Image (cartoon, rainbow, N blue to C red):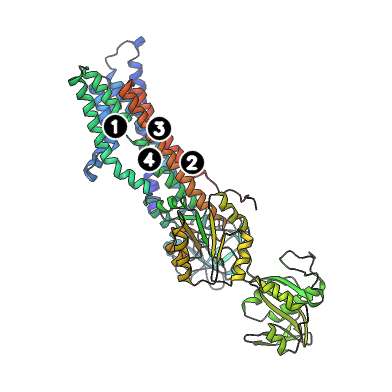
């Protein structure tokens, strides 16, 4: 069982424990109130229920205060509450002391319940992993059921439709749509086929899979996510460190002020000892910084849990806090803003350059012509047996077409490929290949080629024998919604967006124009990216570097905040970044900033409210005085409000990208 699961169970047990105490204290207060009610007359048993209240509710306060003093040599808020309750009883107001214990116990119960909600939101991640897995042999026959802890790399497991996948692995056979929302935060199931990677805790929908296990149970991506969130919950935000240092000296100051309030007025100003002690006990209650202590962790823990549910892992509360300070973002291009693989952008026949029929772009003629289809058909026939990186893009674009066979396939390094298709020597390659085949490009193809190369695209020509039939342009394309996501960052308060890439300047400028980036730095080596990030940091409040976590690792380490995109299955990304996005969805960058800013805003709200309210109660206590009962209600009520305000982050959701273009 993980630390998160243990912490959640411990938090649940403490919540139930405090609930039982609160119920006993409530019953005692009701009984004590009835026995003190004038119409029933003063009962000789009237103090017994209050004694039960002090015993049941007070002993926990005393124990917690003593442990803090014994283990850490510092006075805690529990000490202040115990002293206030004892002092109230000592001056003849046990019923008001009982109210203090009741409200303090109720507040503790609600605080523990709130924190248990946050812990359980993370601990439930481990519930996603099945307890058992179905083993199969090399022929796909079932050989039995075993615990997932017994699975070893190399074994094969069967995943039926509707079942959760038991381990990280690679699909050996079968096919299915897989719901990966629990790992990557993607809302749409992803198609998995032989050779594709799958993760423990995801759900197979609509088909069976035979998966070869690649990682043991404690090494799965799901287990890594849980460990990261556990560490993040233990990490504290800067504001929390300040409050931790502030709490002990402040508590001592409150104790000293309480003693002076109880002693000085009777000695110097002829105030009755009972009145002075009553006001001192009231001060002890209202000056306790309960709300201030919980102001930061309630928001930070909620933000971390919310991010984990949406496939965003913050490595600590400090990084959630830093995300709210970012005003500059640097994006890597390939694999971050773009798909990172070549795609056929346009195919054109030599005789139809005026129409510029496009596949996947914005063509003048939305329907590909027969001439363009013929060019693509011949190219795909030749490329079907090729292994270079453009071949797959051609075959993807030609999917569904009836392709003729290609014989006598030949690959000429640095030029292209050729083969016999329908009795003719078909070829696909660059200008050198065309010259080798004795084909002329004509007058229009060079201009079309220049137009695409100006945008950083690769162009190849297609022909048969000594005739050029047409050409194809390949380019890396933006991820879906990447442009809207980057524009929406401006709405979140990001003032400067730059693209740092090692790619060709023309290609980078084309992408920057599409997403609306403010600056382009292209042709950069990893160390040059580091220098670019340092320059950005020098003129900003905080700079985030968004990359894939491999060649961008030095720049991410230099930035105020390193954000790794698409880290599912990528150990390097998980290790190097401060914030890990499990999916390739660039919209999650916007949500990282949104969560950070919202967490900062809630922490400020909680801090200002708790300090302001505490000062108000102290001033009222010193000036016009305040009934102890009202002081207790005001103090515990503010603590509850602060806790609930922090928990609002658990309900936050990514908003649709609707920023104007």
What is the spatial separation of the Cα atoms under label 3 and label 4, in whole angstroms? 11 Å
Side of 303 relative to 207 (left or right)? left
Quarter of the image for residue 452 reads bottom right
Q: Are marks 4 and 2 in contact (CB under 8 Å)?
A: no
**Disc number for residue 111:** none
What is the spatial separation of the Cα atoms under label 4 and label 2, in whole angstroms? 14 Å
What is the spatial separation of the Cα atoms under label 1 and label 4, in whole angstroms? 16 Å
Residue 48 location (% of width, % of height): 28, 21
Q: Residues within 10 Å of mark 3 (few under 14, many from 20)?
A: many
Query: Is label 3 in a helix, a strand or a loop?
Result: helix
**Which one is in front, 650 or 444?**
444
Instruction: Write the residue at 34% across / 36% down.
Output: 290
**Where is mark 3, residue-wise?**
638
Along the polypeptide, which appears first: circle 2 or circle 3?
Answer: 3
**Where is mark 4, residue-wise?**
294
| 84 lies above or below 365 | above
Residue 538 location (% of width, % of height): 44, 59
What is the spatial separation of the Cα atoms under label 2 and label 1, in whole angstroms? 28 Å
**Where is mark 1, residue-wise?**
81
The mark closer to the camera, 1 or 4, is 4
**Disc number for residue 648:** 2
Along the polypeptide, which appears first: circle 4 or circle 2?
Answer: 4
What is the number of callouts on the image?
A: 4
Instruction: Write the residue at 19% across / 24% down.
Output: 263
User: Does any portion of residue 542 appear in the rendered image?
Assistant: yes
Query: Of all residues shown, which one is farthest toward the front?
Result: 539
Along the polypeptide, which appears first: circle 3 or circle 4?
Answer: 4
Query: Is label 2 in a helix, a strand or a loop?
Result: helix
Query: Of all residues shown, which one is farthest toward the left?
Result: 267
Instruction: Write the residue at 79% across / 77% down.
Output: 350
The mark closer to the camera, 3 or 1, is 3
What is the spatial separation of the Cα atoms under label 2 and label 3, in whole angstroms? 16 Å
């Amino acid at each position: 069982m993980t630390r998160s699961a243990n912490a959640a169970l411990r938090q649940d047990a403490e919540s139930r424990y405090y609930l039982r105490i609160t119920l006993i204290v409530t019953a005692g207060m009701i009984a004590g109130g009835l026995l003190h009610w004038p119409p029933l007359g003063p009962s000789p048993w009237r103090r017994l229920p209050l004694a039960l209240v002090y015993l049941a509710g007070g002993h926990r306060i005393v124990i917690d205060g003593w442990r803090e003093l014994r283990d850490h040599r510092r006075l805690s808020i529990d000490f202040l509450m115990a002293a206030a309750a004892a002092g109230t009883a000592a001056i003849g107001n046990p019923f008001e002391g009982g109210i203090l214990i009741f409200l303090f116990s109720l507040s503790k119960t609600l605080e523990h319940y709130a924190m248990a909600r946050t812990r359980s939101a993370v601990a439930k991640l481990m519930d996603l992993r099945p307890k058992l897995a179905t083993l199969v042999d090399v022929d796909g026959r079932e050989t039995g059921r075993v615990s997932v802890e017994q699975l070893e790399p190399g074994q094969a497991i069967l995943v039926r439709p509707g079942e959760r996948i038991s381990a990280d692995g690679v699909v050996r056979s079968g096919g299915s749509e897989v719901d990966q929302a629990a790992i990557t935060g993607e809302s749409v199931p992803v198609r998995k086929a032989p050779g594709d990677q799958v993760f423990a805790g995801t759900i197979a929908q609509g088909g069976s899979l035979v998966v070869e296990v690649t990682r043991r149970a404690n090494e799965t991506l799901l287990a890594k996510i849980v460990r990261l969130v556990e560490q993040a919950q233990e990490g504290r935000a800067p504001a929390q460190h300040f409050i931790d240092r502030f709490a002990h000296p402040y508590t001592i100051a409150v104790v000293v002020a309480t003693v002076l309030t109880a002693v000085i007025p009777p000695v110097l100003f002829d105030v009755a000892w009972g009145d002075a002690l009553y006001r001192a006990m009231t001060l002890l209650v209202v000056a306790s910084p309960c709300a201030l202590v919980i102001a930061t962790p309630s928001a930070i823990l909620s933000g971390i849990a919310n991010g984990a549910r949406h496939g965003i892992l913050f490595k600590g509360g400090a990084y959630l806090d830093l995300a709210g300070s970012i005003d500059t973002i640097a994006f890597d291009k390939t694999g971050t803003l773009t798909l990172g693989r070549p795609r056929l952008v346009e195919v054109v026949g030599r005789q139809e350059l005026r129409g510029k029929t496009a596949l996947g772009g914005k063509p003048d003629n939305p329907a590909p012509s027969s001439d363009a289809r013929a060019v693509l058909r011949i190219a795909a026939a030749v490329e079907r047996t090729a292994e270079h990186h453009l071949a797959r893009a051609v075959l993807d674009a030609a999917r569904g077409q009836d392709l003729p066979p290609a014989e006598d396939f030949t690959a000429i390094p640095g030029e292209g490929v050729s083969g016999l298709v329908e009795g003719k020597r078909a070829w696909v390659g660059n200008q050198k290949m065309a010259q080798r085949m004795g084909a002329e490009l004509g007058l229009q193809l060079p201009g079309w080629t220049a137009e695409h190369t100006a945008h950083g695209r690769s162009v190849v020509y297609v022909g048969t024998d000594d005739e050029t039939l047409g050409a194809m342009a390949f380019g890396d394309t933006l991820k879906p919604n990447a442009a809207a996501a980057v524009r929406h960052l401006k709405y979140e308060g990001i003032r400067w967006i730059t693209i740092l890439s090692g790619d060709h300047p023309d290609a980078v400028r084309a992408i920057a124009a599409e997403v609306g980036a403010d600056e382009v730095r292209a042709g950069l080596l990893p160390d040059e990216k580091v220098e670019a990030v340092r320059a950005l940091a020098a003129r900003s409040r905080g700079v985030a570097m968004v990359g894939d976590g491999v060649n961008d690792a030095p720049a991410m380490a230099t930035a105020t905040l390193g954000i790794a995109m698409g880290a599912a299955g990528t150990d390097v990304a998980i290790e190097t970044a401060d914030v890990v996005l499990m999916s390739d969805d660039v919209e999650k960058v916007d949500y990282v900033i949104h969560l950070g800013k919202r967490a900062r805003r809630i922490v400020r709200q909680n801090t200002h409210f708790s300090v302001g309210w505490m000062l108000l109660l102290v001033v009222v206590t010193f000036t016009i005085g305040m009934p102890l009962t009202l002081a207790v209600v005001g103090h515990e009520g503010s603590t509850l409000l602060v806790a609930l305000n922090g928990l609002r982050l658990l309900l936050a959701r990514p908003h649709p990208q609707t920023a104007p273009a």
